[in-house]
Image: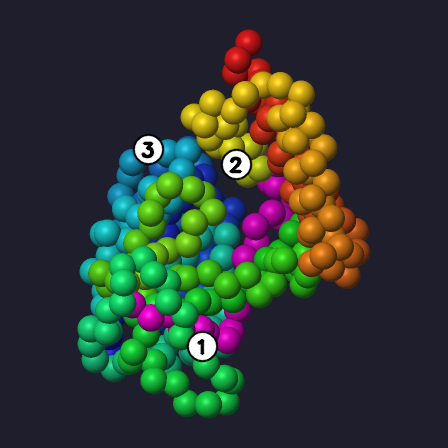
Amino acid sequence: MAKISVAIATYNEEKNLGTCLDSVASWVHEIVLVDGGSTDETIGLAKKYKAKIIQTNNPPIFHINKQKALEACRGDWIFQLDADEIVTEELKNEILSVIPAKPAPAKAGEPGSNQKKNWIPGQARNDNMCSGYYIPRKNFFLGHWLKKGGQYPDYVIRLFQHGKGKFPCKSVHEQIQIDGSVGYLQNPLLHYTSRTRKEYWRKAHAYIALTAQELKEKKLPLNVFTYVQYNLVKPTITFLSLFLRHKGFVDGVYGFLFAFFSALHHPLAYMRYVKSHR
């Protein structure tokens, strides 16, 4: 069987890391964890699972540390995980079923092309031709699975052949780029992104700070037009898109709160950017 490495980047993830590693420790060959200077028990937990630990700083673009984890992996296949994610038994079995018994180089496409290899459920797939795979995610917001609002199936590239994938490390919302064709798995990854409002806003403030920095680097002019754009136009479009266009209303109060909080990202980032000019 080809060897599988799990790559994880962490920062103060003691509340999540144990359940994440529990879901993979028994069937992967290696766990590589890059930690950005955690001050809680994250490192101690990782040691219990015999993870290969690399300690470094905590950059604003967290994908930099995720890429470091990818580069340190030695397995034939790499499975990139976040600490707040859990692999189900069904997903584990599907991953093991698509990985060939012997490591074989996939036919390469254009680097970073993320070419999709579509398939119809129930039909046979020539999985050996795939360099990587999209995996659907179930996103849980305040403990509730968001079925709508653009949050499901939320396909992310997480499984790929060693040497065939990398993070561009330019944005917090980017996908792994794959050199070759990309297939789809059926069983979802469970993503417990924000169990409480406090946890949500802790993470949100980090994204808000990064967006404000991006506005500063772009030298966004401070005038009436940008004020209206970031305090009225963008938040309104975001809310209506998530709550109405993507049917977030189906998730009830959780769908409303998710759309509303997401809309607030724009004015809060703009306010932070304005303060940096004072």
Provide residue 134's location: percent of width, then percent of height. 44, 67
Mark 3 nearby-residue class (10 Å; few <14, some 14–19, many ≥20): few
State how far apart marks 3 and 1 are (Cα). Answer: 39 Å
* Any part of residue 164 in sight: yes
Task: Please state which of residues 4 and 113 is positioned toward the viewer in this rendering.
Answer: 113
Badge 1 marks a residue whose secondary structure is loop
Residue 24, quarter of picture? bottom left
Provide residue 3's location: percent of width, then percent of height. 25, 70
Q: Which residues are magenta?
A: 180-202
* Dot placed on the residue nearer the N-terminal end, 3 or 1: 3
Q: Is residue 155 above or below residue 266?
A: below
- The residue positioned 24% from the left and 57% from the top of the image is 73
Badge 3 marks a residue whose secondary structure is loop
Mark 1 nearby-residue class (10 Å; few <14, some 14–19, many ≥20): few
Foreground label between 3 and 1: 1
* Dot placed on the residue nearer the N-terminal end, 2 or 3: 3
- The residue positioned 58% from the left and 29% from the top of the image is 269
User: Colour scheme in the image?
Assistant: rainbow
Task: Please state which of residues 71 and 149 is positioned toward the viewer in this rendering.
Answer: 149
Q: Amino acid at mark 3?
A: Asn
Foreground label between 2 and 3: 2
Q: Amino acid at mark 1?
A: Asn
Task: Please state which of residues 210 and 141 is positioned toward the viewer in this rendering.
Answer: 210
Residue ID for mark 3: 57
Provide residue 122's location: percent of width, then percent of height. 50, 89
Q: Image quadrant for the C terminus?
A: top right
Q: Image quadrant for the N terminus?
A: bottom left
* Any part of residue 5 in sight: no
Residue ID for mark 1: 118
- The residue positioned 37% from the left and 63% from the top of the image is 114
Q: Residue furthest bottom?
A: 123
